Amino acid sequence: MGSKLSDRGKRHDTFYKRARQEGFVARSVFKLEEIDRRSHLFRKGARVLDLGCRPGSWLQYAAKAAGPQAQLVGVDRTPLDFAIPNCRVIVGDIYDLSPSQLVGPLGAFDVVLSDMAPDTSGVRSADQARSEALFERALYIAEQTLEAGGHFVGKLFQGPDFQKMVKRAQENFAEVRTVKPESSRKESIEQFVVALGRRARPAI
Ligand SMILES: C[S@@+](CC[C@H](N)C(=O)[O-])C[C@H]1O[C@@H](n2cnc3c(N)ncnc32)[C@H](O)[C@@H]1O
């Protein structure tokens, strides 16, 4: 068991070191990289909304993937420590911000991302419920702001309502997959719901 734990530690240290070497501020970038490798989320010049964006590695990745014409919006309760090209950062709570405030002059988004997680309490059922609430809010924002054909990626803790949330996503997207990326800690109950091809135009 000791050696198993130390193997796991080494693997995660590797992701951390790789992130630093490649200039990303967090190892969580590799979760988005893997999802993008499998699902091709970003076209050049894409308009991207990142909910829960601090410290900023997903925005760094989106800026590279969507190129110099990218138009990025990041939201977090805490500001970023550095600037990202073509990115407007909104400091606030996603429960207090309306979809139209997030879209602003862009009109709609091509990709909506959410890596938001609750501050964990250690009480599994309570943490799952708060993760589901964050996921549902992110999905609602995506449904309100995505262009037809747009994509949504949302983090969701596995819990009793996991399949219900997946079904919710299936209502408005052509294809929905669930992904547990290689760089996600094995002991973590996080999964990512990847919803591709928004069916209708945004409501706003
Ligand atoms: C795991 S971190 C995101 C990491 C980011 N994807 C990256 O790679 O740099 C989750 C973030 O979600 C934010 N968050 C959680 N609940 C939020 C809420 N209600 N409104 C806005 N941000 C929230 C937290 O402040 C935290 O910075």
Image: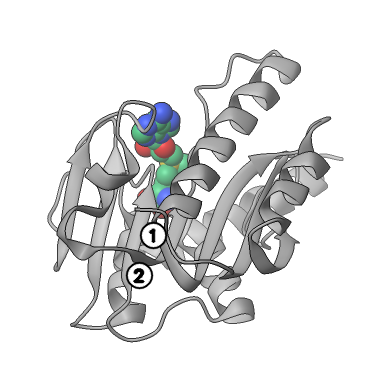
The amino acid pointed to by label 1 is Trp
| Amino acid beneath label 2 | Ala
Measuring from the top left, give residue 68's x and y in whole percent: 18, 82
Q: Residue furthest bottom?
A: 44
Q: Is residue 24 visible?
A: no
User: Which quadrant does ligand 1 occupy?
Assistant: top left
Q: CA distance from mark 1 to mark 2?
A: 6 Å
93 on left or right of 129: left
Percent position of residue 126, x then y: 68, 15
Q: Would you say 159 lies left or right of 79 here?
A: right
Task: Pick the residue in front: 134 or 22.
Answer: 134
Residue 64 image point, x, y percent: 30, 78
Residue 148, above or below 55 = below
Q: Residues within 10 Å of mark 1 (few under 14, many from 20)?
A: many
Residue at 26 percent of width and 54 percent of height: 103
Q: Secondary structure at mark 1?
A: helix
Colour setting: one colour
Q: Residues within 10 Å of mark 2 (few under 14, many from 20)?
A: many
> Does label 1 point to a residue whose CB lies under 8 Å from ligand 1?
yes
Q: Name the residue carrying label 1.
A: 58
- In the rendered view, tell whether residue 185 sits above or below residue 42: above
Image height of 103 relative to 201, above or below: above
* Image quadrant where residue 165 sits: top right
Question: Contact (CB < 8 A) between labels 1 and 2?
Answer: yes
Q: Residue at x 64, y 65 (%)?
A: 173
Residue of label 2 = 62
Residue under the point 29% across and 33% down? 97
Viewer-nearest residue: 183 or 179:
179
Task: Tell me the residue at 63%/59% (across/down).
Answer: 172
Image disc number at residue 85: none
Quarter of the picture holding the N terminus: top right
Q: Is residue 30 left or right of residue 101?
A: right
